[in-house]
Image: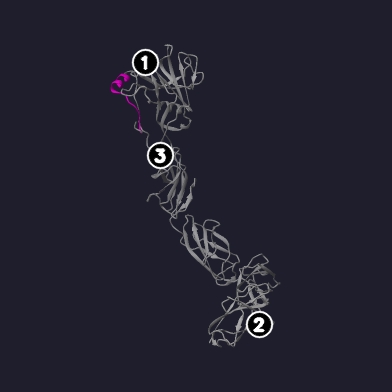
Amino acid sequence: MDAGRWLVRLGAAAAASLTATGVLAVVVVAPASAGSVVTPQNSSWAYVDSATPKSSHVNESGDVPVGGVTDADGNDHKARAYFTFDISGLRGAQISTAVFSAAETRATDCVDRAVELWETGPVSSATTWKNPAVEQQKLATVGYTAGTTCPMPYLGWDATAGLRDALAGGGSVLTLELRVPAPHEGDAKLGRWFANKVSLTITYNRTPNAPTGLRNGDGFGAGKDCALQTPGPFLNTTQPTLYATLSDPDRDQTSGEVAIWPVDQPDNRTTFSMPDVPSGSVGQRRVPAGVLTDGGSYAWQIRASDGAATSLWSAPCYFQVDTEPPTHAPGVSSADYPTGVTSEGQGIPGTFVFTANDPDVVGFTYEWGGGGTAGYVPANTLGGTATASLTPPRPSVDDLLVTAVDRAGWFSPTTDYRFFVSATWPAVSYTGTPAFGTPFTVSFAPGVIDRSGYLPTSYTYKINDGPAQTVAAAADGTASTQITFTTPGPAWLSVTSTGSNGWVSPASQSYFYFDTTPTVSSTDYPESAEAGGAGVSGSFTFTAKVPGSTQFAYSFDFETTTQTAPVGPDGTATINWTPDSAGWYELDVWTVSPDGTTSDPYYYVFMVR
């Protein structure tokens, strides 16, 4: 059978005879492109029998009889069958077709067949031959089909009208009856049996949902939520992209019909389509050229279609059009950081006032010219001013770049507000030349003097990544302390100050390098020179740079073997050495502290003649 059709065919001769008796062939056309197909089975079944006129037969096992039947004792009686379907899931659906199908399991006579399908009232345990279900309408009749098998494994009746009727009445179930036409109901030749499981093949469609999530896209790509009342947001283009979520209960592809009009001309509607999208997806459509004009106020709405049914219109969405950016740069001023003079200072917040020079400005963007904090502040009123507390990120010349933003998101020309900023990190000085491992005095002086609350009450310093140390400041904001560098090589001294208001300054950075390698000297074998000879002894003097060193370690064979010499009271030691042969030599020397810490080695290179 063609998958797109459900067909009970009648032979020509049979069709002529059966049509005369009211028997109809059933032809069900394939569903439309939109919609769904379901094939539910009956939830229950029953039959009534004239042989047991006061008995109900509900959900009994075995096949169900229809028409005139003869029992094993030769007694003739009549039967009707009922099948009930749950149709609650189809409420609100538009029914295209409904085909009731049942399988014949026995037939008294294969030539004669006339079985009617009726819509009836509900069936219960009280339904009997004496009290049958109320017949509401006859739906179809199926008769003999020449050339088909008998019993017929598939018979179909058009139940569309019955299903539509039950749904229109608000019903949750549909009960269908199989019976033989009344004048022939006792005719044994027409009697037959059917399987108790039958089905309905239903093609239906539900109306798409009204679109939701309406949004307006502007020329910069940033969407703006729909406004349900006038005047709505400003869009900066006459061809914005409109967005809406389109959905369908049957999950069909869904398109949209958009209507747009000037708010003051509601009858001047322009309509255009929004292309298909999968159900539940966001559709979009750009407004065609020529529909909108600069300065206009508009409304739009949309309804969805699945190709067979159309939803309700969405609520209107309102917007205005502004395609002209502000023409004037904003004004910028600051009493804390005026232009033309140097102000304190780096890291200290100041108040800046931005002034709109166009009437439709809603706010201001700002950023530091050399990088740093950037942001946005709204104007206090349309075309008004905004006040921002901002902190200059660096000393010397600084630039604050400020741009006005109008209602449509357009940007004005930018104002470059340039001013001078003093450094605010502490001044650091020390006495003499700092030496490794030897305490020396470091002095701190304030980087901020003239601002109340910023005069230092303490200083915090760190050496490299070591622990932070805090020193209290005197009344004039100065302080001093002794520090000792205990790590050879490069060292950073980082110092910040803290004011009475809790403000912490930027850090000053002082760089030191401490060479811990010992010095080596020799008059017998000068460094990088040719002297002496094989078997000629020479002396070498070592001088320690690390205070407290107790030993010199040295090697003439690239540290394959190592010898030691004690550090004398004057921090030196002298050793004697006699070369075995001529050539270049390297003397490696380093100091050792009592805890085993070693200095960097010194590489003393010389040549023996």
Instruction: Describe the element under mark 3 as helix, strand or loop.
Output: loop
Which label is found at residue 445?
Answer: none
Under mark 2, the amino acid is Thr
Mark 2, other Cα within 10 Å: few <14 / some 14–19 / many ≥20: some
Under mark 1, the amino acid is Lys
Which label is found at residue 572?
Answer: 2
Task: Name the residue located 51 percent from the left edge and 18 percent from the top edge.
Answer: 126
Instruction: Describe the element under mark 2 as helix, strand or loop.
Output: strand
- 194 sits left or right of 563 in the view: left
- 590 sits left or right of 384 in the view: right
The correct choice, above or below, for 248 with respect to 20 in the image is below
| Residue 142 x/y as whole percent | 36, 22
403 or 202: nearer the eye?
202
Tell me the residue that label 3 is attached to.
Answer: 306
Whether residue 557 is visible: yes
Q: Which residues are magenta?
A: 4-19
Q: Which sits earlier in the primary sequence, circle 1 or circle 2?
A: 1
Whether residue 232 is visible: no
Under mark 3, the amino acid is Asp
Query: Label 3 to label 1, Cα distance in Å?
Result: 49 Å
- Closest to the camera, between mark 2 and mark 3, is 2
Q: Which sits earlier in the primary sequence, circle 3 or circle 1?
A: 1
Mark 3, other Cα within 10 Å: few <14 / some 14–19 / many ≥20: many
| Residue 162 x/y as whole percent | 42, 25
